Image (cartoon, rainbow, N blue to C red):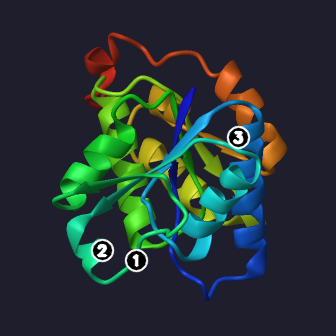
C-alpha cells in the first residue's frame, strides 16, 4: 500500500504534532505501507519520515528543485525524487496512492488536501482521504465543510469524501473500512 501524507514543515508547533507524525510514520511502516510525502527535513515532514525509517519502512520524498537549492530536503532519504515545481510535486504525491492522510499544517498542507478532495469530487481520485485530527486541529475545517453542504455549495454525499479520525491507531482501520469512491461521482459533482 502506498500512502500519501500531507503535513507541515514547521518546527514551531506544539511538540505533540511531531510526536503524532513520528508515530504515524512508524505505524504505516510496521503495516508494510510505503510513505510518500513532500521530502522535507523539518517539522512534521521530518517526523513522519523518521518514524517510518525507524521501523525500516520505505519512504519516498518528492521535492521541487528550488527546495533542494535551499537544502530543505530530508538528509536521510534513500529515495528522493526531484521535480520541477509544486504542481508536479502534488501530482506525483497523489498519483498511485492508495490513500491520503492529512496531518495538521498550514496553507501548503491545506492546498494539497483541498486538491485531493476536489479531484475526488470530480471522479479523478477514488481512494480514502483521512484527516488526522490531532488536538482537534481539523474540527473547525470539518464544521466549515459541513456548512458548505448546508449552504448548498456541495451535496450531502460530498461529506463522505473524507474521514476525520482522532488517533493514529484509527487511521489504518479507517482506510481499510472506507469504500472506493463512486465511479459515477461526476453525476452528483454539481449541486442539486
Taking the image as shown, residue 120 lies to the left or right of residue 54, namely left
Looking at the image, the residue that sits furthest to the top is 184
Mark-to-mark CA distance, 3 and 2: 26 Å
Q: Position of residue 87 (x, y in %)?
A: 20, 54
Residues at circles 3 and 2 in contact by the CB criterion of under 8 Å: no
Q: Is residue 146 left or right of residue 153?
A: right
Going 58% across and 68% down the picture, which residue do you hit?
46
Residues at marks 2 and 1 touching, judged by CB atoms closer than 8 Å: yes
Where does label 3 land, which residue? 29
In the rendered view, does 17 fall on the left or right side of 190?
Answer: right
Give the distance between the C-alpha atoms of the residues marked 1 and 3, in whole angstroms.
Answer: 23 Å
Query: Please, which residue is most extreme toward the bottom here?
Result: 12
N-terminal-most mark, 1 or 3: 3
Q: Which residue is mark 1?
A: 72
Percent position (x, y) of residue 116?
38, 42
Query: Would you name the residue on which mark 2 appears?
Result: 67
Q: Are marks 1 and 3 in contact (CB under 8 Å)?
A: no
Q: Of callouts 2 and 1, which one flags the residue occurring earlier in the amino acid sequence?
A: 2
Q: Residues within 10 Å of mark 1 (few under 14, many from 20)?
A: some
Which numbered disc flags the more N-terminal residue, 3 or 2?
3
Amino acid at each position: 500500500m502506498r500512502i500519501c501524507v500531507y503535513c507541515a514543515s514547521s518546527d514551531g508547533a506544539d511538540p505533540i504534532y511531531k510526536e503524532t507524525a513520528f508515530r504515524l510514520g512508524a505505524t504505516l511502516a510496521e503495516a508494510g505501507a510505503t510513505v510518500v510525502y513532500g521530502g522535507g527535513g523539518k517539522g512534521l515532514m521530518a517526523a513522519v519520515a523518521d518514524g517510518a525509517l525507524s521501523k525500516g519502512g520505505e519512504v519516498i520524498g518528492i521535492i521541487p528543485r528550488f527546495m533542494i537549492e535551499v537544502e530543505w530536503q530530508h538528509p536521510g532519504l534513500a529515495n528522493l525524487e526531484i521535480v520541477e515545481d509544486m504542481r508536479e510535486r502534488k501530482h506525483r504525491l497523489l498519483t498511485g496512492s492508495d490513500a491520503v492522510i492529512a496531518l495538521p499544517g498550514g496553507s501548503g498542507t491545506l492546498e494539497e488536501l483541498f486538491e485531493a478532495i476536489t479531484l475526488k469530487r470530480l471522479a479523478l481520485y477514488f481512494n480514502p482521504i483521512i484527516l488526522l485530527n490531532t488536538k482537534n486541529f481539523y474540527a473547525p475545517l470539518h464544521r466549515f465543510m459541513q456548512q458548505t453542504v448546508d449552504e448548498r455549495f456541495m451535496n450531502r454525499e460530498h461529506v463522505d469524501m473524507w474521514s476525520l479520525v482522532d488517533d493514529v491507531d484509527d487511521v489504518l482501520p479507517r482506510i481499510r473500512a472506507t469504500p472506493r469512491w463512486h465511479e459515477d461521482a461526476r453525476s452528483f459533482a454539481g449541486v442539486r
